[in-house]
Image (cartoon, rainbow, N blue to C red):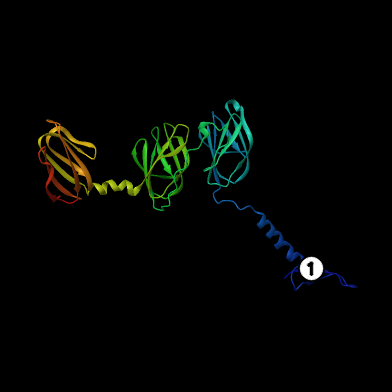
Amino acid sequence: MRREWTRIPGRAPREYPLVRGSHPVMSLRWPLLSLSLWVSAPALAADGVAVQVRCTEKCTVVLDGKHGFRVNDSTWEFKGIAPGSRRIDATGVLNRPLAGSFVVIPDVATADVFLASNKRILIEPGSSTMPGTPDWAEPKPPTPVSTSKAPSVATVKCQDDCTVLLDGKRGVRRDNRTWEFRDVAPGQRRVEATGGVFNQRQFVGYVEIPGGSEVTLQGDSKGRVTLTEQKDLEAAEQPEASAAMTSLVHVRCAKPCTVTMDGRRRGTSNATNLSLRDVPPGTHALEVDFTVGGKLRRLTLEVPARHELFVTASEEHGVQVMNTKPLTGTP
């Protein structure tokens, strides 16, 4: 309960309680003020924009008066930057001014700023570059978007001995320059590599990992990491599955011959007995060219899955299938 001094005519001032609380004007003013501050607060992304600034030479970069993380001699990284107009200043050797200007950072996950000949060139993922952009600043075509939400397998390769972290976690070292990461969730992933005598940073960057894929990431000497190879995990596993369904075809010629299947020579020339392994099921064009006489015999061969076929070839009777039986053993 609040109290307030109230003067009554003819009497000394006394303290009377105000039962109704504070003044109605005061009770309304403060909630309105706090509401206006809340509404005017900018709605920013939770993590902000990851900005990389690259120079054509060794440089020191400051963004809004603050230093970031040096990736290498010519690349700096700034994390958690709010979108909007930001001041970027870069100096070279002996504090020689290179560039100083305001750059508008878009509301995206990652953005690259390239400084060349006192020009600020902002590269936004998926956008086209302005005329006069140097070749080294041109972005690579975006990776086809994958709709799969399944985890992927990422292989990261370095140019020297390295230790690689993907989103701050280690994978499995395949050799001194290769690391493998399994069960990688699709989306933007931070890849960082360090190495050398003083454990210096070799490269760092954000890469869009597609879902359900087997990808290869390559770091370069400029501190960048890019996706260089991508294939579907199901397609990568398909050769192993299809290999278990292949068949074996034995070809016996009456005279020395050369055998061709689907336009590709199989086995050695001038042979009389050949075994064609790992023949996939389906229709195949089989050709037998006899060395002596130069006669060519052809046959459209239907090969079932996991079977063994016995074929004979002669100039008089052509190419014939003599016997077919299932392959023994488990796939």
Say left or right for 286 vs 58.
Answer: left
Which residue ends up furthest to the top in the rendered image? 94
Which residue ends up furthest to the right in the rendered image? 10
Q: Quadrant of residue 15?
A: bottom right
Residue type of the residue flagged with mark 1? Glu
**Residue toward you, 74 or 163:** 74
Q: Position of residue 292 (x, y in %)?
A: 12, 30
Q: Residue at x 17, y 45 (%)?
A: 248
Question: How many marks can you see?
Answer: 1
Q: Position of residue 212 (x, y in %)?
A: 38, 50
**Residue toward you, 178 or 254:** 254
**Residue toward you, 88 or 108:** 108
Please say whether residue 325 is visible from this viewpoint.
Answer: yes
Say left or right for 268 vs 17.
Answer: left
Say left or right for 203 vs 300.
Answer: right
In this rendering, is residue 238 above or below 69? below
For mark 1, give the secondary structure. Answer: strand
Q: Position of residue 43 (x, y in %)?
A: 61, 53
| Residue topped by disc 1 | 4
Q: Position of residue 279 (x, y in %)?
A: 21, 44
In this rendering, is residue 190 above or below 293? below
Please say whether residue 280 is visible from this viewpoint.
Answer: no
**Mark 1 residue crowding within 10 angstroms, few (<14) / some (14–19) / many (20+):** few
Q: Residue at x 58, y 28 (%)?
A: 92
Task: Give the quadrant of the N terminus.
Answer: bottom right
Q: Quadrant of residue 270?
A: top left
Say left or right for 259 vs 60.
Answer: left
Q: Residue at x 43, y 38 (%)?
A: 193
